[in-house]
Amino acid sequence: MFCSQSIAALILCIVSIGFGTLIPSITFLMTHPTKVALIIGTCIIGYFGCSLILTCMKLYGAFITITTTSCRKCVSIGLSFLLFPKPLTWRFIFAIILVFIGIGINIYSKQKKNEEVKHNVMIEKHVEEEIVPIQKNTVQPTPSKEELGC
């Protein structure tokens, strides 16, 4: 993961040089050292977050990880409404409904896939029970000239 992040940072530096924003960014950070500490802190927290996601995926699988991250996002949005009051418009309600529909579709598709796998396994077991083992052909010795009457 560190290697891929390093490659991404290198690509961003090249793009910043191409657009001419690297030098102004460096001068800004030199004049505001607290921003450097915030950037480093954000990078460290992001790295640990990625590590936790990959560990969750390794231990519990992709489906549980995706469901967990989606639920975490829903909780974050809910806390955002509680901590920073804002008007609840139809767009927010529509987005919340879409998120829950997406989670429901994920759960339904996973459940369907598990049922199909169980069904296929049962069919394979049934077919294996009905297969008759093929007997090996035995090689007969070739008859001699005397046996053939020559």
Image (cartoon, helix red, strand yellow):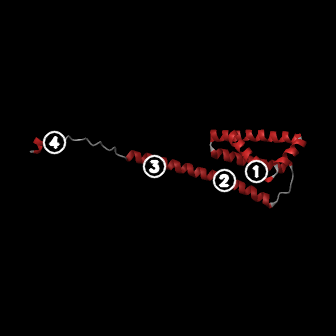
**Mark earlier in primary sequence (3, 2):** 2
- The amino acid type, in three-letter code, at marker 4 is Pro
Q: How far separated are the C-alphas under marks 4 and 1?
A: 83 Å
Label 3, on which residue? 123
Label 4, on which residue? 143
Of 109 and 35, nearer the camera is: 35
Q: Nearer the viewer, mark 4 or mark 2?
A: 4
Image mark for residue 15: 1
**Mark earlier in primary sequence (1, 2):** 1
**Mark earlier in primary sequence (4, 3):** 3
- The amino acid type, in three-letter code, at marker 3 is Ile
Disc 1 secondary structure class = helix
Disc 4 secondary structure class = loop
Label 2, on which residue? 104
Residue 96 position in % (x across, y down): 75, 55
Residue positioned most to the right: 31
Marks 3 & 2, CB-CB < 8 Å contact: no
Residue in view at x 75 percent, y 57 percent? 95
Q: How far separated are the C-alphas under marks 4 and 2?
A: 73 Å
**Mark earlier in primary sequence (3, 1):** 1
Left or right for 25, reference 60: right
**Mark earlier in primary sequence (4, 2):** 2
